[in-house]
């Protein structure tokens, strides 16, 4: 079997599609439902249930990318979702609601897996950092293609709060920054990241990656920064790949 249902839970939308993990492609149209407010476990479980029904998935196992630190299915943080998620066992929650077996990982780690397998990170050795710039900043670290999970670059203390409050796409929108001001802001964060981790490649993902041309001139050319190949679909493709891997390994 090479087709898996995957879901990407985000601060504004919950997206899902059936993915062919051999090809790294969507097999069904991507369906997006609004993230409920407040984004509590019960409400999100209902939305996931609805999404699975709308997609018409008849299998029993799914992959989920979730915007938090995830260890063995447990949600350990809640910066962009409701605080009531902390310590929730996500596979248990979804099993009780929809009867599905869930394989869950951090959303940026999922996006990074897709990009390293089929996108700009394919075959790349050394240290590769994938950043998803959206409501927050997600990060995925790879060394010679192997993922080091749950690294939270966006939550790193930075100036007067944390990095995602300055360089995420929502910081740009909330502060109504021009592309020039935002580009310089992002560059400062990327230079800082480079100083600490010396990556060989930085891949910029999230919806804003398709607008790369608007801010790329403000990014230090000495940094090896490239926009992602997959924009908003990286998260679901990677979550499906993660589920496929888990099922294969038993
Ligand atoms: C969360 C990360 C997540 C990122 C992108 C951050 O606020 O702490 O876990 O990957 O947002 O959704």
Image: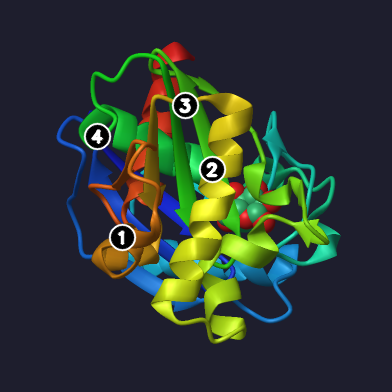
Mark 2 and mark 1: Cα distance apart in space: 14 Å
Category of crowding for the residue at label 4, using alpha-carbon neighbours closer than 10 angstroms: few (below 14), some (14–19), many (at least 20): many
Give the number of the mark in front: 2 or 4: 2
- Residue tagged 4: 21
Q: What element carries label 2?
A: helix
- Residue at the (56%, 53%) spot, across then down: 188
Viewer-nearest of labels 1 and 3?
1
Asked whether disc 1 touches disc 3, contact meaning CB atoms under 8 Å apart, the reply is no
Question: Which numbered disc, 4 or 3, marks the residue closer to the eye?
Answer: 3
Q: In this view, does 80 lie above or below 239?
A: below
Disc 1 versus disc 4: distance between alpha carbons? Answer: 35 Å
User: Spatial distance from mark 3 to mark 2, Cα to Cα?
Assistant: 11 Å
Mark 1 = which residue?
Answer: 217
Q: Earlier in the sequence, mark 1 or mark 4?
A: 4
Pointer 2 residue: 191
Q: Left of 67 or right of it: where is 238?
A: left
Q: Quadrant of residue 226?
A: top left
* Label 1: how many Cα within 10 Å (few below 14, some 14–19, many 20+): some
Disc ID at residue 121: none
- Answer yes or no: do the residues labelled 2 and 1 have beta carbons within 8 Å? no
User: Of 247 and 119, which appears nearest the observer?
Assistant: 119
Q: Residue furthest bottom?
A: 176
User: For this view, does 25 lie left or right of residue 194?
Assistant: left
Foreground tag (1 vs 4) = 1
Residue ID for mark 3? 199
What element does badge 1 sit on?
A: helix
């Amino acid at each position: 079997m090479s087709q898996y249902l995957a879901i990407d839970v985000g601060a504004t939308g919950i997206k899902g599609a059936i993915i062919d993990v051999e090809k790294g492609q969507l097999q069904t149209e991507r369906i997006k439902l609004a993230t409920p407010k407040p984004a509590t476990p019960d409400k999100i479980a209902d939305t996931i249930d609805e999404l699975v029904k709308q997609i018409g998935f008849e299998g029993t196992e799914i992959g989920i990318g979730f915007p938090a630190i995830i260890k063995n299915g447990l949600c350990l943080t809640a910066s962009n979702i409701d605080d009531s998620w902390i310590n929730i066992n996500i596979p248990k929650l979804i099993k009780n609601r929809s009867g599905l077996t869930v394989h869950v990982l951090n959303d940026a780690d999922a996006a990074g897996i897709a990009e390293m397998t089929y996108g700009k990170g394919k075959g790349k050795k050394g240290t590769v950092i994938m950043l998803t710039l959206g409501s927050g900043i997600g990060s995925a670290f790879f060394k010679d293609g192997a993922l080091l999970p749950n690294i939270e670059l966006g939550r790193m203390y930075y100036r007067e709060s944390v990095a995602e409050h300055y360089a995420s796409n929502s910081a740009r929108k909330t502060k109504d920054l021009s592309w020039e001001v935002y580009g310089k802001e992002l560059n400062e964060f990327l230079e800082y990241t480079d100083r600490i981790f010396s990556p060989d490649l930085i891949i910029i993902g999230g919806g804003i990656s398709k607008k790369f041309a608007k801010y790329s001139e403000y990014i230090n050319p000495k940094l090896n920064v490239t926009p992602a190949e997959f924009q908003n679909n990286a998260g679901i493709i990677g979550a499906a790949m993660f589920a496929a891997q888990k099922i294969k390994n038993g």
